[in-house]
Amino acid sequence: MKKGKIIILSAPSGTGKSTIISRLMQHPELKLEFSISATSRSPRGNEKHGKDYYFLSLEEFEQKVAQGHFVEWEEVYAGTKYGTLVDEVDRIINSGNNLIMDIDVKGALNVKKKYGSEAMTIFILPPSLKELEARLRARATDSEESLMKRIAKAGYEMEFAGKFDFQVVNDNLDRAVEEVEKHIRDFA
């Protein structure tokens, strides 16, 4: 059986990355599968271990980090860590499926460094920071302070775009989906 590949998408918040991924997931011939992330937080609601997340205690999480069991990980909030386990990546690509990852820029570059030619990185760009700000304002989900933090973070993240294999500008959603899909077909 042919081994799957790793496809990594990164983008600032509000760029349309989740929508692009959800459209791509509607194409079974791409054989895309999401990895299940590990987290040090407790399950919420009906979340199940091994389905929604791999729930680990903070001690277990840190032990796995020290032992090199993570491809990438991040402390998102103080004491709350999220990451992708090497075993989870191997499970998916060894099944012949292509792993699609939606992770931050640093995590994306770490995965690419570890897997080399088996991984492809795609950075989704907004048409401009001004347009991104307009999109985020239209969502009406953030306070002004939170919005300004997101814009600043977006500017920082966009500085990494040139380190990715491909950059796709999402100025037209259908065209952006087509472009990302073409990169996946050419790669996988």
Image: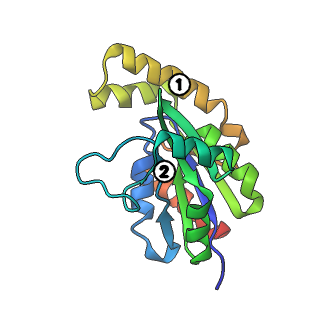
Res 119 quadrant in image = bottom right
Q: In this view, does 131 lie above or below 74?
A: above
How far across and down, in percent of the image, does residue 104 sit? 56, 40
Q: Is mark 1 on a helix, strand or loop?
A: helix
Q: Nearer the viewer, residue 108 or 52?
A: 52
Label total for image: 2
Whether residue 9 is visible here, answered yes or no, is: yes
Compute the Cα span from label 2 to label 1: 24 Å
Res 46 quadrant in image = bottom left
Q: Is mark 2 on a helix, strand or loop?
A: strand
How far across and down, in percent of the image, does residue 81 sit? 50, 38
Q: Earlier in the sequence, mark 2 or mark 1?
A: 2
How far across and down, in percent of the image, does residue 110 sit? 69, 45
- Could you tell me which quadrant the C terminus lies in? bottom right
Residue that numbered label 2 is attached to:
38
The extreme left residue here reads 45
- Could you tell me which quadrant the N terminus lies in? bottom right
Indicate the amino acid at tag 2.
Ala
Query: What residue lies at 37% left-to-right and 31% top-to-bottom?
Result: 135
Query: What residue lies at 58% left-to-right and 55% top-to-bottom?
Result: 85
Q: Is residue 52 left or right of residue 24?
A: left
Q: Which of 89 and 129 is in front in this view?
A: 89
Query: What residue lies at 39% left-to-right and 58% top-to-bottom?
Result: 22
Q: Which of marks 2 and 1 is in front?
A: 2
Q: Is residue 97 above or below residue 11?
A: below
Crowd class of label 2 (few under 14; some 14 to 19; many from 20; radius 10 Å):
many
Residue that numbered label 1 is attached to:
153
Crowd class of label 1 (few under 14; some 14 to 19; many from 20; radius 10 Å):
few
